[in-house]
Amino acid sequence: MKTLTLKENQTLYEVIAQQSPVDEPLVLEQGGRRIAVLLPPDEYEAYRAWRQAESIHIDWSEGRTLEDVVADIKRRGPGIPNYREATVSLKDLLENTSHDPTFNLEEWEREWAKINAEIEADDEREP
């Protein structure tokens, strides 16, 4: 990584022109302290995608509806890795899904309760 000092009489354009094309990170300093880092476009895009992926957190806190969560995901937009625009609403998918006649909700809830109890017991054992 290269470091350039940004002097008071140098414009940022002149500094960048000295290093064109920027093929590795370029640190700009002024008065002995870092003020910026210029990145090659590919590195910047990779960093941006990583930051966006790291920031993805769906808040299911009380009072949030499914519509709130979907709106939050849409707001984040196509920059999210593996993002695809929906062609049908989740509501329509759920309403038009065929029902399994062998599905037993009570049995499923009993099994889920056992699994949840195991998870909670494991959580209590961890320091």
Image (cartoon, rainbow, N blue to C red):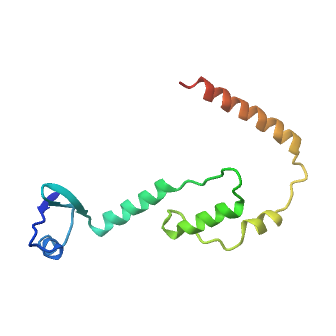
Which residue is farthest right? 101
| Relative image position of residue 86 (x, y in whole percent) | 65, 71
Report which quarter residue 39 is drawn in: bottom left
Which quadrant holds the N terminus? bottom left
Taking depth in this image into account, of 74 and 29 the one nearest to the observer is 29
Report which quarter residue 69 is drawn in: bottom right
Q: Is residue 88 left or right of residue 36?
A: right
Taking depth in this image into account, of 57 and 107 the one nearest to the observer is 57
> Which residue lies at the image location 37% right of the left edge and 60% below the top edge?
47
Report which quarter residue 72 is drawn in: bottom right
Q: Is residue 62 above or below residue 38?
A: above
Q: Is residue 78 left or right of residue 64?
A: left
Q: Is residue 113 left or right of residue 46?
A: right
> Which residue lies at the image location 53% right of the left edge and 63% below the top edge?
82
Number of numbered discs: 0
Q: Is residue 34 above or below residue 11?
A: above
| Relative image position of residue 41 (x, y in whole percent) | 30, 69
Q: Is residue 104 above or below residue 114?
A: below
| Relative image position of residue 28 (x, y in whole percent) | 18, 62
Taking depth in this image into account, of 101 and 61 the one nearest to the observer is 61
> Which residue lies at the image location 87% right of the left edge and 48% below the top edge?
103
| Relative image position of residue 25 (x, y in whole percent) | 22, 61
> Which residue lies at the image location 17% right of the left edge and 55% below the top edge?
33
